[in-house]
Image (tube, coloured by chain):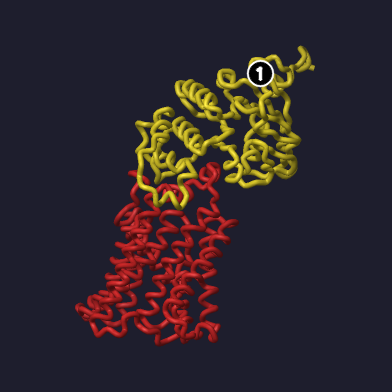
Amino acid sequence: MLETILSTESIRKSFGAHCVLDGVSLSVRKGEIVGLLGPNGSGKSTLLNILSGFTPSDGGAVNVDGHDVTGLPPHAIARLGLVRTFQLPSMPHRMTVREVLQAGCRREAGLGGALRRWRYDAEVARLLDQFLLTRVQDQPASALSGGQKKLLSIATALRSRPKLLCLDEPTAGVHPNLRSRMVELLKEVNAQGVTILVVEHDMEFIRELCGRCVVLDRGALIADCAPRELVENPRVVEAYLGKAVEKGKLTA
Amino acid sequence: MFEFLIHVSTMACLFGLLALSLNLQVGFAGLVNFGHIALFGCGTYGAAIAFANQWGPVAGLLLGGAAAALLALAFARLGRNLGADYWGIATLSIAEILRTFATNEQWLTGGAQGIHGLPMLFGSLPAPWGPLATLGLCAVLLAVCWALCQRLVNGRYGLALKLLREEPQLASSLGYDLAALRRTPLVISGLIAAVAGFLFAHYTTFVGPDQLYSAETFLIWSMLIVGGLGNNLGAVAGAFLMQFLLAYVPFVKDALGLPSEFVAAMRLTLVGGGLLAFLLWRTQGLIPERIGGRHA
């Protein structure tokens, strides 16, 4: 039995009268790639924001690698190993791609880092190469295409040595060719021991990448299964396509 | 004329220190501080209070530095719950509160009349060696602070500050404690401003609340905008350019036979007009921020 790296217990969140998460409990084991699915407005991004500390929950608990992180600020959660990317990665205007990657490693950027002499950074060079960013390394990070920004945000997240990488819609607005490469890249990252939780709409991407999926609908967990089982799950089909209507009912 | 040149150069070095220190906050860490003059005031009043109590100049420097560090920490603490623009307004308010405090607490600060008669640092030397030695000291300190700021911002630490300035949410998601990241440049900047204040107090031999008007903060801001935000060389160049331009306005008045009122009006026009011109036509300043390159 693999060790659990992330577990949530009865997470609740409402915005005014609108209940977004209604007691969500899930767990992710070390080494897994888990897809978090659900129709628009089902609460996926809110759940990710709560897990990473960017949004406080109304109730429930979050545990990351044996630490109760409920209510901790984002930087404290990141330091415990849960690092996330954003759905619309906003990148700096006055920093190059390489500079963003260099700044990604917090441990090297302390005040002591100001005293260290310049040295060739093999890890930055490797990530630039792995994530197809070598050619654009001296461009301002904000000038990258949407897909390149997603790649840079994942590469930057890896610089902080995450145990659990949470990706918010990594393929949204990404060219299909880049999408295939992203699947390979994330599998490589996972093979190096990084657990991945990915919020995604693209079913093809999920099928290629994930070993397990959890599905949210209207703030509740409705499925926890292998990707191939999703289409056979009536609750998932209903969440995405609506309830089947009996023949003749509409004309009544 | 030689003495005047030494005086303007000394003042340019002092404003260069202030511009460097503000640049560390605004140019690199994105901390929009409108109350920067209060950190300078910690240095001037530290020197003056130590003089009034006969504690000696070293105690004055330490007192000013400690007060500036504490004020910088208070600014940082205040910034934890405020957005950048609201924080800027809060720093302006705090600077005004401190100026009012200095105006009214006569027992400590000498009130509106301030504290007179501080000794010049090289007062025992005959002219022009005394002012020249002061200029030399100010120039050396400016060079040291410039080298310190360069070291800070050219390394990985500088990149972390830039990430804080540009994308705080991204920095936070990577494990950066934004409050701690804001604290350090504020304290270092406060210490540099306090050193400038200490030197200024002993150079002019007088400390008063009129030196702490918010207009002085905006003068330093205009030096930064003209010189180049996010570039240490630009900050110092902006300070020297503005200082020399403002100092030579009376000569233009004399040459053109204009009335005395022209001087004040021309200085305002130079600051406001220069600021506007750079904001409209050269937003990056005379020496723009360097993007890319090698980092330690």
Q: Which quarter of the image is occupied by the C terminus of chain A?
A: top right
Residue type, label 1: Ala
The residue sitting at the right extreme is A252
**Left or right: B84 in relation to A237:** left
**Left or right: B133 in relation to A247:** left
Residue A88: x percent and y percent?
52, 36
Shown in yellow, the chain is A
- Helix, strand, or loop for circle 1? loop
Question: Which residue is the site of mark 1?
Answer: A226
Whether residue B144 is situated above or below residue B172 in the rendered picture: below
Residue B231: x percent and y percent?
35, 55
Which one is nearer the viewer's eye here, B251 or A28?
A: A28
Asked whether residue B33 appears in the rendered view, the answer is: yes
**Which image quadrant for residue B251?**
bottom left
Shown in red, the chain is B
The residue sitting at the top extreme is A247
